[in-house]
Amino acid sequence: MTVPQGTIRTFDVATRTATLLDDLLVEHAVDAEAVTASGLMEMRIGQRVRFELDGDRVHLVNIVSL
């Protein structure tokens, strides 16, 4: 099973929510719970990530490092 990847499109520091655009150009909302579960303090716009979906909900985001 391939883990989907995408790029952070927006990140709101105050609400700790984000949106990401996957490689198929589908936008996904990332709620504060998913950001916290991922252990991330912040995300940068344009940052490359792997993510897991539970239905339509993103529940885990990991930074892709080169």
Image (spheres, rainbow, N blue to C red):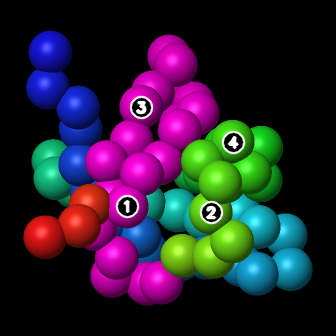
**Between tags 3 and 4, which lies in front?**
4
Query: Mark 2 — residue?
Result: 40
Which residue is at a point 42% across and 31% down the rendered structure image? 52
Q: Can residue 18 be seen in this view?
A: yes
Query: What's the amino acid at mark 1?
Result: Ile
Marks 3 and 4 sit apart, C-alpha to C-alpha, by 12 Å
Q: Is residue 43 above or below residue 27?
A: below
State which tag comes first along the sequence, 2 or 1: 2
Q: Position of residue 56 (x, y in %)?
A: 51, 26
Give the labeled residue for mark 4: 37
* Residue at mark 3: 52
24 with respect to 49 (left or right): left
Q: Which image quadrant is residue 39 in?
A: bottom right
Q: Distance between the residues labelled 2 and 1?
A: 9 Å
Judge whether residue 22 can be spotted in this image: no
Q: Distance between the residues labelled 1 and 3?
A: 12 Å
- Magenta stretch, overall SS: strand
Element on which disc 4 rests: helix
